[in-house]
Image: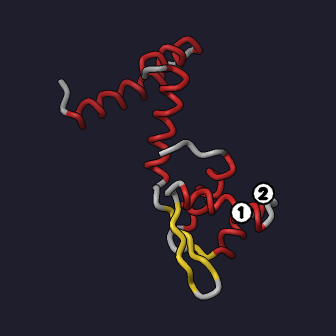
């Protein structure tokens, strides 16, 4: 998996919100706020298909688009990618957060979360 440019990510966000077998008209409507031309959206969709993020199926005279990568899969990949690129390790990331100052509630939330993770993975 590769990290997506912001423009392609916006197309993916629209597809994730719309589901599977999304008609082009529905996708155009979801992306209207960006004021992209039809050709621009075609370019982004073509790139996403080539990268394996989206499938396209012909339906009469139009196309239906389906995300092949879930939002959760992409967010997990992207988070790891950013963390590794910027901080190297989760510990370095946490150290950077701590330097900026975490309040008591944030620390408690993180502690609870880590304890839950530890319980799920079976580490003692």
Left or right of 96, for residue 123: left
Residue 39: quadrant of the picture: bottom right
- Picture coordinates of residue 71, whole percent (x, y): 49, 52
Q: Mark 1: give few (<14), some (14-19) or many (20+) Cα within 10 Å.
A: some
Q: 94 or 80: nearer the eye?
A: 80
Whether residue 62 is situated above or below residue 33 in the rendered picture = below
Q: Which residue: 64% across, 58% down? A: 11
Whether residue 2 is situated above or below residue 27 in the rendered picture = above
Residue 65: quadrant of the picture: bottom right
Q: Specify the farthest residue to the front.
A: 50
Q: Mark 2: give few (<14), some (14-19) or many (20+) Cα within 10 Å.
A: few
- SS at circle 2: helix
Q: Which residue: 45% across, 41% down? A: 76
| Disc with the residue nearer the chain's start (2 vs 1) | 2
Q: 7 or 113: nearer the eye?
A: 7
**According to the image, label 1 marks what residue?**
41
**According to the image, label 2 marks what residue?**
34
- Picture coordinates of residue 67, whole percent (x, y): 51, 62
């Amino acid at each position: 998996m590769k990290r997506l440019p912001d423009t392609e990510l916006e197309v993916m966000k629209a597809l994730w919100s719309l589901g599977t077998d999304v008609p082009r008209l529905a996708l155009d409507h979801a992306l209207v706020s960006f004021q992209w031309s039809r050709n621009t959206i075609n370019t982004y969709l073509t790139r996403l298909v080539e990268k394996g993020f989206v499938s396209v199926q012909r339906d009469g005279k139009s196309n239906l688009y389906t995300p092949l990568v879930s939002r959760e899969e992409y967010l997990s990949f992207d988070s790891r990618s950013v963390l590794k690129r910027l901080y190297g390790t989760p510990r370095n990331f946490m150290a950077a957060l701590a330097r900026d100052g975490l309040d008591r509630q944030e620390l408690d939330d993180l502690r609870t979360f880590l304890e839950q993770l530890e319980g799920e993975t079976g580490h003692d």
